[in-house]
Image (cartoon, rainbow, N blue to C red):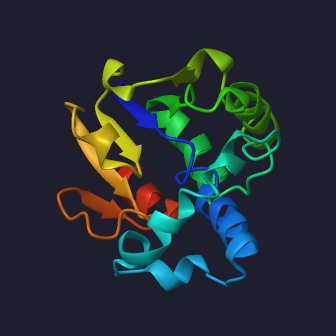
Amino acid sequence: MKRVIIDMDDVMADASKGILDMYNSHYQTNFQKSDFQKNTLWQDEVGIKYLKVRNGLFQPGFFRNLHVLPDSQEVIEKLQEKYEVFIVSAAMEFPNSLKEKHEWLEEHFPFIHWKNLVLCGDKSIVSGDIMIDDHEKNLISFKGECLLYDAIHNQPINDYKRVNNWKEIGEMLL
């Protein structure tokens, strides 16, 4: 059985919306995720200023209260019938996220066994056949097939097959 490695933030959980909510509140702006599609707005303007509000990711509740990305629950549950699925998240940078990510998964993805959850610091330690992630830094060392999940911060990256949503992933893998 092939193994699929799935990231959490900006792949299953809408971290971009949480980040934009913090950013918009601090800078009194009204950015939406759609503002970042197919451009370098994050790299040119928002990402640099975001560093000043990034401490919000360390606050209790940030990771626990993220929204579920559409169709992820249904597609991941079906993927488990065909693949060995592991949820792998680089959670060590944000200590609160360890417990919060576990609780979030229990609530929104109760069908994922705790043995299939890997909270780590560096994803280069994992192996599998397919990795779905929004960060190139995690895909670059992966030996299998890489799927770059579309996110506000990765628009300029063109070296990987880009997937825009979970329906596309379902069509590809199921």
Q: Nearer the viewer, residue 110 or 18?
A: 18
Q: Residue 63, percent across and down?
A: 72, 43
Q: In the image, is residue 79 above or below residue 173? A: above
Instruction: Tell me residue 18's x, y (percent).
Output: 69, 60
Q: Position of residue 81 (x, y in %)?
A: 53, 34
Q: Is residue 43 visible?
A: yes
Number of numbered markers:
0
Quadrant assignment, res 8 = top right
User: Which quadrant of the figure contains the N terminus?
Assistant: top left
Residue 152 appears in the rendering: no
In this view, which residue lies farthest toward the top? 115
Q: Quadrant of residue 99?
A: top right
Q: Report x, y in % for residue 168.
A: 43, 64
Q: Nearer the viewer, residue 91 or 67?
A: 91
Residue at the image point whose x is 76% and y is 38% from the top:
104
31 or 115: nearer the viewer: 31
Q: Residue at x 77, y 42 (%)?
A: 59
* Residue ranking furthest to the front: 52
The residue depicted at 42 percent of the width and 50 percent of the height is 174
Establish if 154 lies above or below 39.
above
The residue depicted at 42 percent of the width and 33 percent of the height is: 5
Q: Nearer the viewer, residue 50 or 67?
A: 50
